Amino acid sequence: MPPVGVGVQQLANKPVVITSEYIAVIKSRRSSDVRPQVEGVITDIFAKSGDRVTAGKALLQIDASKQQATVESDEASRIAQDEAVHYAQQQFERAKQLLSVGAISQQELRVARRGSLVRIKPEWVDAWLDTPQSEQDYEDDA
């Protein structure tokens, strides 16, 4: 069998255009999730996606009215608690004076003391009443 003929072609450098389409998500290698420490409505945004930011720079502003209301409510509760404690202490001191002149009984003094403890911190009452020293304390206060 005779050899098969082969065609020869001269090569030349030419640009080759290759394109492909892909669906992808590009994510930065250096990124951080940022979450606020409080709840609220965002009223202004100072940085956008991709911006470089430094520590301490404000990224957004949250409406402070909810937090302000919480702070004011907590402050009012604290003041009311302080006043209740002060009133309870006054009542207990008054009861001690009345006991010393015989105007009230030892039991009424105990009720006054229990009331003062409840206003200060209710769980203290049970702990204090469970101690063997509590009866002696009543007598010492009189």
Image: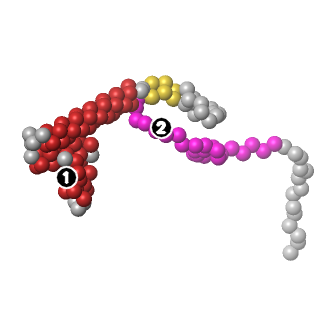
Q: Amino acid at mark 1?
A: Glu
- Queried whether the magenta region covers residue 46, the answer comes back as no
Q: Secondary structure at mark 2?
A: loop
Residue underneath mark 2: 36
Q: Which residues are magenta?
A: 15-41
Quadrant occupied by the N terminus: bottom right
The residue lying furthest to the front in this view is: 101
Residue 53: percent from left, percent from top:
63, 33
Q: Residue at image x 58%, y 45%? A: 24
Q: Residue at image x 26%, y 51%? A: 124
Q: Nearer the viewer, residue 68 or 109?
A: 109
Q: Nearer the viewer, residue 120 or 19?
A: 120
Badge 1 crowding class, 10 Å Cα cut-off, few under 14, some 14 to 19, many 20 or more, is: few
Residue underneath mark 1: 139
Q: Nearer the viewer, residue 72 or 69?
A: 72
Of the two numbered discs 1 and 2 in the rendering, the one whose residue sits closer to the viewer: 1
Say which mark, if any, is on residue 128: none
Classify residue 136 by image quadrant.
bottom left
